[in-house]
Amino acid sequence: MENYIVSARKYRPSTFESVVGQRALTTTLKNAIATGKLAHAYLFCGPRGVGKTTCARIFAKTINCLHPTEDGEACNACESCVAFNEQRSYNIHELDAASNNSVDDIRQLVEQVRIPPQIGKYKVYIIDEVHMLSASAFNAFLKTLEEPPRHAIFILATTEKHKILPTILSRCQIYDFQRISVEDTVAHLAYVASKEGITAEPEALNVIALKADGGMRDALSIFDQVVSFTGGHITYQSVIENLNVLDYEYYFRLTDQLLEHRISDALLLFNEVLNKGFEGSHFINGLASHFRDLLVSKDPVTLPLLEVGAGIRQRYGEQAKKCPLPFLYSAMKLCNDCDLNYRASRNKRLLVELTLIQVGQLNPEGEEVPGGRSPQPVIQPLIPPQQPAAQQQPAAAPQPATPKPAQAQPPQAAQTTAARVASVLSAHKAEEKKIPVMNKSGLGISIKHTPTEEKAYEPAPATVPTQVAEAQPQEDYIFNERDINYYWQEYAGHLPHEQVALAKRMQNMRLTLLDATTFEAVVDNPIVAKDFTAMAPAIQDYLRTRLKNSKVTMTVRVSAPEEKVRAYSRTEQFQMMMEKNKALKELQDEFGLEFA
């Protein structure tokens, strides 16, 4: 039985022309060989499976070829090329730095560099995974890499360029290999399939290329796996079944259900996906990618960004016409937030289901629809904006003392009364403006507040005369103890990193209002009181701006001995514990314990 060779080795490129997806780099290397402008050190870096080591071998064979072709390729007929093809060439040395990363290995390599080649012009040293070399090995290699013999050329290959010392990078010509595009991968897989007598659907090869993520070696390995599963006839259905990939059909069905606000159907489809063994993170990532593909399908300019087969591309175009842009923007945002919170969530299934419910409640404008089916109702004002002010006279204007009926008032009196009602209403609105609108859910406190605190938010009676309201248009806002504590915490969060200890102390403090505009900060020692006193002007300015009240005043007081002092640091907590139990001090002294 003939030995089987995997496709990644059997169809490994042997010429620059056969390298897939790296046209710019191969052209540069061919021109350098043709003009004789060869550097003494090269660095090939890029993702796995994109042709770094392959190009290094082709480059090494070509520069030693005795009769190169006119287009700059190796002839594959001279003694040097034949020796390389038969893997018996002494001019090309490969070193795996992952297993030979010590100083002794580099010293042995340096000693071999001194020996000139027997056949050909150059001795080429290919060091793969060079980022695995130790720091001392790099240092031992520096001098030889900078000034090698005339016949020596080094080619370093790595997937992690950032791990290489800058002194090494500065001595090399750097070539960045890019990921192989889906179109190039599909074309090469189709070529391999034709050579092997295998039939393959374009959509199936497209799924393999997407799964490979830009690596040709991975694509060929997956191709061999699918061939073994299908027996030589690769279909789209067999590929998604063998590779455990979610079918596009799921996402098309789910998007239609979400557009029609059919939340229950969407949840059932998600349950079906889970029953097939897929993770929720994989599902939500695929849904986000599906919305992204729908977005790029709406504009012919961004259509090249859609990396799918021809049949799937048509379906994307049809469904993209149904999806408004605001809906896609909001849906992508919700899916991305779900992906970010997935790892930290304890109930991961519930997190994905909540995301589906939120997406299903989006209307064409990208806003949530209550109930998931009906459009958002428009709330009508209780009082029409154009209602005459004279109609509100019985509710706001004072009753006349004379027993005459209201209809018998002269026109001037009616106009005066209407003007007075309008002025009182304007004063009432100005008084209501003093109350800052606070989002109780964002304060980090319970929304169950006492009736006393509730009264602080009630507007004052509209008894201010019109002349006073007009004379003081910039009146200060009122605030309560909850407001001052909220913006105190906000100020603590804006302190720089150098004042982190002071910020922690502020976050653990609770301020007390002494009167309508003066608050008190109670600290436990004079040193901290001195710090807060120095910061008082800046804190007052910040709170006056945030509370919109120019009379906010801060006072600092050191707590009395009988007051309960809160322990902020671990040292203070330990001191308070020692006051209650003297044995803790003896334990610390006995074992010599210290805080880490």
Image: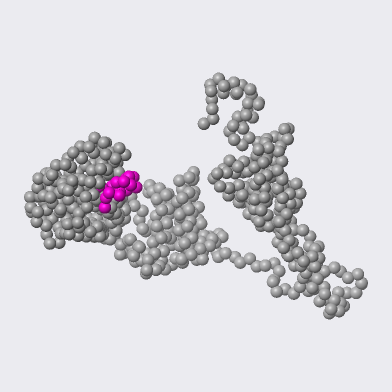
Report the front residue among 39 and 359.
39
Q: x and y percent of residue 413 in the render?
A: 85, 76
Q: Is residue 148 left or right of residue 309?
A: left
Q: Spot the residue most to the bottom.
A: 411
Question: What's the residue at 46%, 48% (across, down)?
Answer: 342
Q: x and y percent of residue 405 in the render?
A: 88, 74
Q: Would you say residue 160 sits in the magenta stretch?
A: yes
Query: Please, which colouring scheme is shown?
Result: one colour
Q: Would you say residue 231 sits in the magenta stretch?
A: no
Question: What's the residue at 54%, 27% (across, down)?
Answer: 594
Q: Spot the residue most to the right.
A: 402
Q: x and y percent of residue 409 in the render?
A: 86, 77
Q: Is residue 74 left or right of residue 284?
A: left
Is 263 situated above or below 123?
below
Q: Is residue 524 left or right of residue 121?
A: right
Question: What's the residue at 63%, 66% (across, down)?
Answer: 379
**Residue 59 in sight in this render:** yes
Over which residues does the magenta segment extend?
A: 156-173
Is 349 situated above or below 102?
below
Number of marks: 0
Q: Quadrant of the N terminus?
A: top left
In which quarter of the view is residue 73 placed? bottom left
